[in-house]
Amino acid sequence: MTAGALFGRAAWDYDRARRQLVPGLDRFYGAALGSVPFAEEQEIKVLELGAGTGLLSAMIAEKFPRSRVTLVDLSVEMLRVARRRLAGEPG
């Protein structure tokens, strides 16, 4: 079984499990967002490798509404979850 298939099995419950396993997950992502060296109104392009369910990409899209975010992941199921999450985002 491939890594993509293994993550695909966990895709629909991944965010809940990750929050249980990684204390301070929101603060961790908040630190990543705070380190982006661009103004919130700028048009930026972001490539997220290992994007999983798109949780970080959604936070980027929210903070930087003119961003264009591209997600890459080994798991098609993870990207399906991410697509649903980001469906309402303009970028």
Image: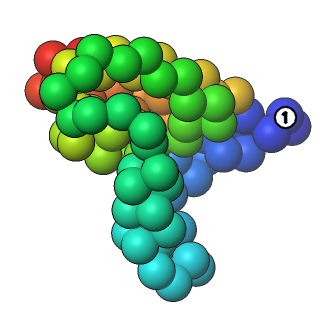
On the rendered image, what quadrant is the C terminus found in? top left
Residue 52 appears in which quarter of the rendering? Answer: top right
- Whether residue 1 is visible to the viewer of this picture, yes or no, is yes
Left or right of residue 36: residue 84: left
Residue 41 on image: x %, y %: 17, 27
Q: Is residue 30 above or below residue 62?
A: below
Q: Can I make out residue 75 in this image? A: no
Seen at 73% across and 45% down, the residue is: 6
Image side of residue 34 versus residue 23, left or right: left
Please tell me how many numbered marks the rendered image carries: 1
**47 up-or-down from 50: above or below:** above
* Residue in the picture at 84% in, 34% down: 2
Q: Residue at x 86, y 37 (%)?
A: 1
Q: Which residue is mark 1?
A: 2
Residue 9 locus on image (x, y percent): 61, 46
Seen in the picture, residue 43 relative to 32 is either above or below; the reply is above
Q: Work out whether residue 26 or residue 77 is closer to the camera in this orientation and state it.
A: 26
Q: Position of residue 81 (x, y in %)?
A: 39, 36
- Give the amino acid type for the residue marked by disc 1 in the picture: Thr
